Structures are given as C-alpha cells and as structure tokens.
Amino acid sequence: RKEVEQDPGPFNVPEGATVAFNCTYSNSASQSFFWYRQDCRKEPKLLMSVYSSGNEDGRFTAQLNRASQYISLLIRDSKLSDSATYLCVAKGGGSNYKLTFGKGTLLTVNP
Amino acid sequence: GAVVSQHPSWVICKSGTSVKIECRSLDFQATTMFWYRQFPKQSLMLMATSNEGSKATYEQGVEKDKFLINHASLTLSTLTVTSAHPEDSSFYICSASPRVLYGYTFGSGTRLTVV
C-alpha cells in the first residue's frame, strides 16, 4: 500500500465548479499534512497546511480526519488559474522531518 | 520569506560526465535540506536528507556514491550526479524549511538531460 494515496484523476471541471480532492495516508505516526500545487514542469508550491480542526483560506478548505487517516481539499468557485496538479503531503512525526508525497491529482478548469 | 534558490534550472550533459546542482536557502539557515527526484507523471521521491556538517542520509535504493551530497554551510547544499547516464535524466528538486512545523519551500528544480 502506498504511504500517501490520492484520487488518480484527472479532473476536468468548468469554471465556477466546486471540486474535492481526497487523500489517505498509511503512516499513523505522521504529524503534519499539507496540500501543494504543482504547475507543469515547475516546483511544488505550498497551498495550505491541514489542521485537525479544518482550515479555510479563501476558496480553499482543507480537512483532516486522523481517525480514518483521511485528508481532503475543497476548491469552491474554481478559476482557470486553479488548473494544476494537487499534491497531498504527509510529514513524519517526532524528529522525522521527511515529506511523503502522493502522486498528485491533475485538475483542469475549463472556460 | 523562506526562499530556496536552486541552480542550474536545466542542464544537458554527455553520458559519463558529472553534474553539480546547488541549493541555497536565501533568507534563513537550514541545517537540513532534502533532495527529491521526479520522473514524468510521477510523484516526488525523496532521494536523501542533507545534514549540515555531517553525512547525508540516503533513501533505500539511492546510490550514495553516484549522488554525492555536500552540505558544508547552513545555507548551501550541493548534489553531484557522478558519471551520469541517460536513465539519470529527471527533474531534481531540493527543499528546506526555516522551522520544523512550517511547510517546506522548494527550489525551482533542475531538469537534467543526459545524452
């Protein structure tokens, strides 16, 4: 089983749509979680951290369920500029600073 | 803040030569930096953890004699791909974080093509 698994995608949605990404992680010792976005042939860029209480940043909402080891990202009112690959990332606990990446889910927002 | 600079952005080299990639933290000190490799349509795979002043820690399956890592200062880590072969062609990215609980910032990556 992969350590971090994401929806395989790709997702094609019209502008203004709401899209949800799902992610599960297998290492229960993971402490921190993030969503990154990666544009084609570019480096990943931090989109947002994910907290147990859930957190929102504008049109983006992230949720974490530690009991089911599940992470989600919701994008509301999607824009053309949201088109990218979304990476679910888990960071190890304690002194383990390693990041484990999911394979990513490609999102294309169409006009 | 938390800017990571990586050079070169792309490099084409002949098979058998060595290539050095630099990763710098511009506005913070990084005792630890990470080196990743990403093949097309694949996720980022951690190659090694670079530790300032000590030996790097390599992930299973990564040849330490082929991928030499030097982290001589708190702001610079280098990855040298020695005797490069076409199968080493990939996107290499470094990352670092100013604080343990922060997300990590990535360098802009180096696209290596070995011909």
Image (cartoon, coloured by chain):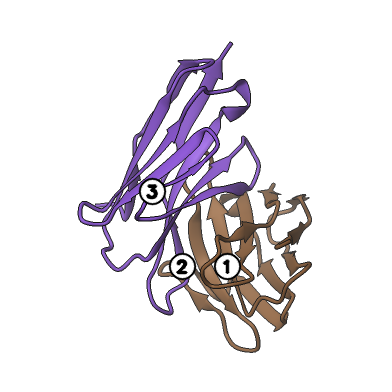
Position of the N terminus of chain B, as image quadrant, is: bottom right
To which residue does mark 3 refer? A54
Farthest-out residue, top: A111
Is residue A107 placed above or below B10 in the rendered structure?
Answer: above
| Residue B94 falls left or right of residue B10 | left
Quadrant of the rendered structure where residue B56 is? bottom right
| Pick the front one: B87 or B51 | B51
Identity of the amino acid at label 3? Gly
Mark-to-mark CA distance, 2 and 3: 23 Å
Whether residue B112 is visible to the viewer of this picture, yes or no, is yes
Mark-to-mark CA distance, 1 and 3: 28 Å
Q: Earlier in the sequence, mark 2 or mark 3?
A: 3
Task: Say which chain tag 2 marks.
Answer: A
Quadrant of the rendered structure where residue A92 is? bottom left
Q: Which chain did the renderer colour purple?
A: A
The colour with which the image depicts chain B is: brown
Identity of the amino acid at label 2? Lys
| Residue B15 falls left or right of residue A49 | right
Residue displayed at 63% across by 74% down: B68
Mark-to-mark CA distance, 1 and 2: 8 Å
Task: Say which chain tag 1 marks.
Answer: B
Labels 1, 3: front one: 3
To which residue does mark 1 refer? B34
Labels 2, 3: front one: 3
Farthest-out residue, bottom: B53
Answer yes or no: do the residues labelled 1 and 2 have beta carbons within 8 Å? yes
